Image (cartoon, coloured by chain):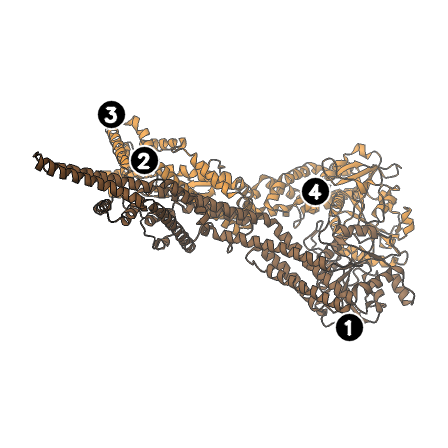
Chain colours: A brown, B orange
Amino acid sequence: MTMDHARGESVDFASFDDLVESLARWSGSLPDWAPARKVRTEWEQIEPRLDRARRELTRMLVVGVIGGTGTGKSTLVNALAGCDLSPAGDIARPTTINPVVVAASDVDLSWLPIDAMNARVVRTDAAAVANIVLVDCPDPDTQTESGQGSGQVPHSHPRPSDSNHNRDILEAVLPACDVLLLVSTAQKYRSWVVAREVAAFAPGRPLLFVQTHASRDPDIRDDWRRELESQGFVVPQIFRLDGVEAATRTAAGLEPAAGFRELVDAIDVELVGRAARRVRRTGSLDLAGWFLRQSREILAPLREPVAQLSAGVASENRRLEGILSRSVASRLRASRADWQRILTSEIVERWHGGPFAGFLHVVESISAFWPRMRAAGSGLISRLLSGQTASPLSEGQAGWQAVEELGLSAAEVEQSRSVLCGLSARARLAEPLVGRARLDESRVATTVSTLLERTAAWLATGIDRLVAERRGRIDGPVFRWVCEALFSGLVVAVLVRAGWNFFIGHLWQGRVVDGGGFLQEAFVWVILWGFFLRWIAFARVRVGLDSDIQSLVARLPEAHLTAPLLADFAAAADATGRFIEQGDDLVRDHESLVAHLAEPAGGLGRLRGESP
Amino acid sequence: MASFHRTGFSAWAGSIEELCGLIDALRPLASSLGAPNPQDEDWYGALFGKLRPQVSREPVLVAAVCGGTNTGKSLITNTLVAAEISRSVPEAARTRHPVASLPQGLASRADLAALFPGFSLAPWASVQDAIDLGPDATGNADRLVWREDASGRQPARLVLLDTPDIDGTLRENWHRAELVRNACDVIVAVLTQQKYNDAAVRNFFAAAAAAGKAVVVVFNMIDWPRQRDRIGGWLATFTAETGVAPLAVYAVPHDFRAAEAGRIEFHPLSELTPDGASVDLAVRLADCDFDRIKLRAMEGALRVVLDNEAGANAWLDSFETSAKEWREARRLLTDEARVRVELPTAPREIVWNEIWRWLEPRRSGLDLTVSKVYRVAGKGVNWAARRVGLVRSEAERREDFSVVELAALKTALGDFIERLDDACRRNPRLAAMLDARLVEGDRAAWYADLERRHAGLPLVSEDYRVFVRNELDRFAKENPALVRFILTGLNVGAVARPAITVALGMAGAAAVPAAAASAGGLSVLVHHVGDVVVGTAATIAGEGALGLTMAGLKPLIERLFAGWSAERSRVLAETLHDVVLGDRLEEIDRLANAAAAPEVTRARQLLRDFGRELGPKVAAAEGREVSQ
C-alpha cells in the first residue's frame, strides 16, 4: 500500500519534473521578444522556489506567522512554543522588529538563511512546534509607504518611523516560508497593506487563517471569509482563539481552549510528515499554475496583434504578388518580338528535310543578316525569353534595379514592409526579430537575389513548358506533311507548268518562249506562298498565347516568389504565434496534472486560480 | 465672529475663486503634460475642499471623527451627537459614506453641496445609509449623508461627521475620508493600541496636522484602567510621527457590552491635555474657540497650498519641466522628421504650357505666329514619332510619370514613418504621443490615402496657376527686358530636377505649408526654395547674350519647376498631416508652449500675492482676536 503510494508519487513527480522542464525551455525560447522576456523574468523568480521544493521534499515546513501590528503574532508564537520566546505586549508598536525563528532543539537549521533574514533563533521542546519551524515575522503596516499613497506630506524633520523597515524585513523573510499563518483581529482583517503583502506572497504558499483577541473582539470570521474570498483565496477554515489566554492556560498546565487546540491539531495534521510533502507538492503545482496564469496575462493582449501580423504578412504578400504577376504578364505580352524569335527558332530547328523546311531555313538565315530594329531588352524577362537564363544574379547585386525590371518597385516593397512594421510594433516585435521598413544594402542584395533567382527559375520553367506545349502543335507529322505538300505542290505546279510550256507549248506547238518571265513570276508566287504557309504555321503556334500567359501568371502566387521580401515578418509572426500556442499547451498540461494529482485541500487555505 | 468676516480670509474670496478657476482650466493641460493629477495632491484638497467653500461662507466649524477600520468611529460619533446617526456594526469598514449631523436650521441657511465639495449629498433616511448608499444619478459614488440635529442641543455652528476608514481594503473609503479631512476644522482622531502607529493612520493625521487642523485624540478600546499609563507613551509616538499637537486627549475603555448598547464613556486624560482641563468631549467641542480654530485651519490650508515643495507652485513647476521635455521632443522631430522626395523630373510641357498661357496675350503678332508655327510643327513631329513607336504618347508618358511619382511619394512616406518611429524610440514622450498613431494606426490605409490623393491630383492645380502667374508677373516687373527670352530659357535651360524636402518644422519658414497647417506651430512642410538641383543645359548653351539671359532666367525657371513639384509633394504632406499624424502635432505644440500659458502666469502671480500677505495678515487677525 505504502509502496504503491510512493511509486505513484514518484511517477507524479516525474511528470511534474517534465512540466517544469518544458516551462523552463518554453520561457527561454524567444529571448528577442519583449513579452517573452517578461515571461522569462517571471520564470526566473519562481524557478529557484520550484527547484528548492523538489530538492527539499522531505525537510520540515517553515511556517511564517504574519499579520498587522498588534494582532498578537508574537503572543500566538509564544503560546505555541509554550514559553515567552518573542517579546509581546502593548508597550510600544511595533514590538517585533527582527524575526524570531522557533524550532525544536534537535532540528538542523543550516539550510535556512538565518543571517540574511536577520533572525534570532530560539529552541523549544514544545510539542506544537516539534515538527515545523515557526517564524515570528515583523508587521507590514508600520513602515511608511515610499512615494506611494495619497495624503502624504513630505516632512523635513526626522521622525521615529524613518528607521522603520519592518515591511522590508518581512519581504526578506517570507521567501523562506513554505506556509503562511495569517493572524488578524477585528480591527485589522480589512487592512489594505496586509492584504497587499499577503497577495504578493500567497502564490504557491498554503495559508492558515487565525482570528486572535477572541476574548475581547466579536467573531468576524464570516465577514473575513467573504473578504478573503473576494481577494481570490480558498478559505476552508478560520481559527479563532485568544493568544494571551492560551499562553496562560499552557503556563498553568491547563487544557487549551477549543480554538487553540484546533489550530495545534491542524498544524499536526496538515503540515507534518507526509502532509508536508503534499503541501510542498500542491504548493509547487500552484506556483507553476500561477506562473502560467501570469504568462497568459502577459501574452493575452498580444494574441490579437500577432494574429493580425500573420494576416498582414499574407495580405501584403498577396498584394506584392498581384503587382508582380500583373507586370510580369504585361511584360510577357509586350515582348512580342522575343516570342516571335523564340517560336521561330523552335520551328526552324525542329523542321528539317523538305522543301518547306528548306524555305524556312533560308528565310531564317537571311533574316539573321537583318539588323534587329528592336534589340532584345536588357530586362530579366527579355533575357529569359532570349534564353540567357544563366545568371540573373550577376545583376542581382545591383539591388532594387533588378527587381524593378520585373515591375515591382522598391516603393511597393517598402510600403508592405512599413505596413508590417506597424503591425509588428503592435505585437511588440522589434529588431532583431524583424527588420526595418527600408532594407539595408546587404539585405537588399540577398533578398533581391533570392527573389530574382526564384522568379527566374519559375519563369524559365513556365516559359519552357509553354514553348514545349506549343512546339507539340506543329510537331505532328500530319501538319508537317500538309505544309510540305502544299508548298511542294505549288513548286511542282510551277515546274510542271514550266515544263509544259517548254516541251509542249514551245517544242510541240511552236509557241514563242516567253523567256524567264513566267519563272520569275512563279518564283515570286512560290515565295509568297511560302510566307503564307509560314504565317499559318506560326499562327498555329501563336494562337492563344495571351491567355496562356495569363494562366501562367495566375499560378504565380503559388510560387510565393515575394516571400523572401517579407520573410523576417513571416518568421517573427510564426515564432510569436508558436510561443503563445506552446504556452496554451503548457496550461493544458498543467491542468491535466492538477486534475491527476487532485487531493482534498484539507484545512489549508490557498490562492485560487482566478479571483472571482 | 464679525471680525472674522471682516478681517479673515473672506477678503480673498475673489482671488481664491480665480485661482481655483485657473487650476481647473489647467487640469486638462496638466494631464496631457504628464504632470501629476492635482486631485491626488494635498494642496488641491486644501484649496478646493477648504479654502474655496469656506472662505466667504457662514463660518461653521466642521468636526470629523476619523480613524482606521473597526476602531469605533461610528459609536463615538453617535455618542457625541447623542443619537444613532450611523450604524455601528462589528464588521470592519462598513461605514462607507460620511454622515454629517448639522445644527438645526443650517441646511436651509447654507449651501451644503458647496460646504462638502466632491460629495453628492443625500438627506439622512436611516442608520443604514452610511452602509448601503449607492452612487447617485450622475454616477458619483462619493455620497455624504446629512441630518439635522433633532434634539437642538448641538451648538449652532458645529457640524459633526462620522467618516469612513482610512486604512481598509476599499480605497474609495480612504478617498472619502480625505475629502472630509480637507473640509473639516477639527478632527477627532480615534486611535487604538493596535493602530496608533500604523503607517496609513500616521499619514492621514500628518496631513491633517500639516493643514493646521485642530486634533482631539481619543484612544478607544482601552483596557481600563490597566493600560492608562501606557497611553502617554503611545501618544508621544503618535505626536512625534504626525506632528499633531492635540487639543485634548481622551480614553474610552473597552467594554463590548456597553458598546453594543451604544453606551461609552470618555475619560478625559488631563495629564496629557495642554490646558489640563477635565472637560467632557462633547462640551469641549461645543465650547472651543470657533473663530480661532477656523482661522487656524484656513491659514493651515493656505500654507499647504503655498508649500514650496508640495504646493501649487510645485505643480506649476512640473509644467515647466514637462514643457521643456516637450520642447526637446519637438526639436527632435523637426531635426529628424524630414525626408527628401525623389520626384521624377517634371514633364516639361506642363510648366511650358503654363508659361505659354501667361505669355500669349503679351507677345507681338509675329512672335506669336512664329511660336505657333513651331508648336504646330513640334506637334506634327511628335505625332509622327508616336506613330512609328519611337516616342510614347503624351498620355502614356503621363502614366509613366505618374507611376514613378507615386513610387517616389510612397518611398518618402515610408521613410518619414520610419524616421518618426526612430524618433519615438529615442524619446519616450514622443512615443507616448505618437504610438497611438504609429503603432495602432492602420498603415495600409495611409498608403491607400496617399494613392487616393495622388490619383485625384490635377496635373496643374489652380494654386500652381496662381503661383506661376505671380512669379512671372513679378519677374516681368523686375526684368522687363528679359520677358521675351523666357521661352528660350525654358527650352534651353529648364531641365531642373527639383529636390523637394518634406519635413516637420515650425511654420513661417520659406515653405509651401500643408493645407491645414496652423500658423506659427509645428506642421508638415514642403520645402523647395534654395534646394534645387540646377539644370545642366544652361552651361552647355552658356554663350554670349543668351548666357547672360540665362543667368537671369535660371532662378525663375527653377522656381517654376520646383513650384510644380512642390505642389505635387503636397499630397504627401496632406496625408502625413491629416491621416498619419492627425492632431498630434498641434498637441505637441500646445504642450511645448504649456509653461507660457497665461493661466500659469496668472496662477503664479496669485500664489505670490497670497504668500506676501499670509504672514502679516494672519498675525493681525490673531492679534485682534486676542485683544477682544
The 10 Å Cα crowd at callout 2, few under 14, some 14 to 19, many 20 or more, is some
The 10 Å Cα crowd at callout 3, few under 14, some 14 to 19, many 20 or more, is few
Residue B128 in percent (x, y) is at: 83, 41
- Three-letter code, disc 3: Gly
Q: Is residue A475 above or below residue B513?
A: below
The answer to which of marks 3 and 4 sits earlier in the sequence is 4
In the figure, residue B288 lies in which quadrant? top right
From where the camera sits, is residue B516 visible?
A: yes
Real-space Cα distance between discs 2 and 3? 31 Å
- Check the residue under mark 2 and report the chain it is in: B
- Three-letter code, disc 1: Val
Q: Nearer the viewer, mark 4 or mark 1?
A: 1
Q: Is residue A148 left or right of residue B475?
A: right
> Mark 3 vs mark 4: same chain?
yes
The answer to which of marks 4 and 2 sits earlier in the sequence is 4
> Mark 1 vs mark 2: same chain?
no
Q: Residue B404 versus residue B91: which sits nearer the camera?
A: B404
Secondary element at tag 3: helix
- Three-letter code, disc 4: Leu
- Three-letter code, disc 2: Ser
Q: Residue A114 versus residue A319: which sits nearer the camera?
A: A319
* Disc marking residue B365: 3
Secondary element at tag 2: loop
State the residue position of label 1: A107
State the residue position of label 2: B393
Residue drawn at x 89%, y 53% as measured from the top left: B254
> Mark 4 vs mark 1: same chain?
no
- Check the residue under mark 1 and report the chain it is in: A
Labelled pair 2, 3 in contact (Cβ < 8 Å): no
Figure disc tally: 4
Residue A319 in percent (x, y) is at: 46, 44
Secondary element at tag 4: helix
